[in-house]
Amino acid sequence: MKKILAVTACPTGIAHTYMSAEALKKAAEEKNIELKVETRGAVGVENALTEEDIAEAHAIIIAADTDVDEGRFGDKPVVKVSVSEAIKNPGKLLDEALNKKPATRDYVAEIEKTKAERSAQRTGVYKHLMNGVSYMIPLVAAGGLIIAISFIFGIEAFKEKGTLAAALMDIGGNSAFALMVPILAGFIAHSIAEKPGLAPGLVGGMLASKIGAGFLGGIIAGFVAGYIAKWLKDTIKLPKNLEGLKPVLIIPFLATLTTGLLMIYVIGGPVKAIMDGLTKWLSGLTGTNAVILGLILGAMMAFDMGGPVNKAAYTFAVGLLGSAIYEPMAAVMAAGMTPPLGLWLATILSPKKYTPEEREAGKAAAALGISFITEGAIPFAAADPLRVIPAIMAGSAVTGALSMLFGATLRAPHGGIFVLPIPHAVGNLFMYVVAIIIGTVITAILVNLLKRPANATEV
């Protein structure tokens, strides 16, 4: 029997979420179909789909009028409709899901699946932090590039009111960047306490920005707000007919008030002092110290190719963009591009050392590398970790160190080579490209020196 999964969610999370779930369950019983429904209502996620459920499922129905993370479903066929459609035609949706054919897999899809699996495996503090970072990145990317475009008219052209440069700076710097820390904090809290944690997290993040506590203050505010909201959610018990007040009134009010007072009177001041010290230290980095920082960040980017160490380096660099420190971001992106690019080059330079499948994978790795998707190196590292990982770490470390030595800067946290042509997005562009090329070549040479021919017998 084919197993079908479903996710239902409506904007308020009160009525239609559960009505659509019940309609699908009833239709599944009538058709004798095995069905499990995850509801994402005002009180949070209930009957959550597990990795085992997803692995066993033939297809997934998403009946939602809000965003639902589809990455966790990998290559499983998905039927997407509104909640009202699930209420009206549940039987039709089940038939459509049953008739879906599994998607054809390819190398890039496998990489995306690996990323989704890693995301699903995240737990605790790391999971919550990465949730906040993932929502923050589009703001940083959009804001940074719009600010860079404003510089086309002159570095200080935005100071003249009424000009296009001033408008662009207002959009990128005063709006997108201003939302960066509140969104970071809000979605850390949302990851911990779900919807009830969002309001206190956003307010805590806004206070962190106003106080000057920066991204570090935002991170702390997000965790404080999230755990306070979760505690209130688990502790407060109301009659069933009043439960709807908890997520929309009681918890947001109490958690926002508590988080706000803690940020103003307890947390904000000390964290601001730490951020001021960090900013001053990083702004004064030159010579050997800058090279060492780039070396460390570069090696971290290649160590686990998208895992916790990689994400720690990336989060550090992204957070500094709000403090107008752009050198670490440049080092991190360059070092994240070189592992897959270096492995692609290695298959070109010494094709006999690689199987036909590995040479084909090298072509996909090149496409992923230029897009700043470090996970493109995973298949090679998984097949031969003791030789591949040290080689790619060396190449990335050199790239990060050179980027810092050259004083390269980057205003966008993602995009790979596609952000390079944008005026002023990258500082010292020529030498930045040189750093990436050198790291790519070093990676390829080291991999080929260490790697045995494809038909060699392992000792």
Image (cartoon, rainbow, N blue to C red):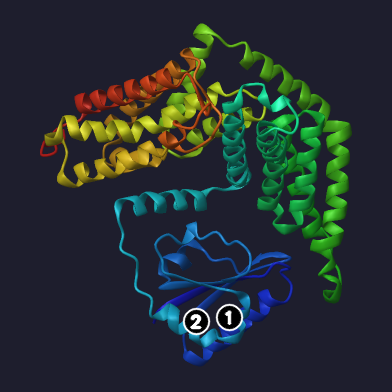
**Quadrant into which the N terminus falls:** bottom left
Residue type of the residue flagged with mark 2: Leu
Q: Which residue is drawn at 59% across and 40% down?
A: 142
Decide if residue 356 is on the left or right side of residue 159.
Answer: left
Of residues 228 and 326, the one drawn nearer to the viewer in this rendering: 326
Residue type of the residue flagged with mark 1: Ala
Residue on which disc 1 sits = 86
Residue farthest toward the bottom in the current orientation of the protein: 30
Distance from Cα at disc 1 to Cα at disc 2? 7 Å
Whether residue 389 is visible, yes or no, is yes
Q: Residue at x 53, y 75 (%)?
A: 36
Of residues 83 and 190, the one drawn nearer to the viewer in this rendering: 83
Q: Position of residue 356 (x, y in %)?
A: 15, 45
**Quadrant into which the C terminus falls:** top left
Query: Residue 13 is drawn in which quadrant?
Result: bottom right
Query: Residue 453 is drawn in which quadrant?
Result: top left
Number of residues whose C-alpha sits closer than 10 Å to that of mark 1, classed few (under 14), some (14–19) or many (20 or more): many
Q: Which residue is drawn at 51% across and 17% down?
A: 293
Q: Are marks 1 and 2 in contact (CB under 8 Å)?
A: yes
Residue farthest toward the top in the current orientation of the protein: 287
Of residues 442 and 383, the one drawn nearer to the viewer in this rendering: 442
Q: Residue at x 65, y 14 (%)?
A: 281
Chain-order first, disc 1 or disc 2: 1
Whether residue 28 is visible, yes or no, is no
Residue 358 higher or lower than 282, as above or below: below
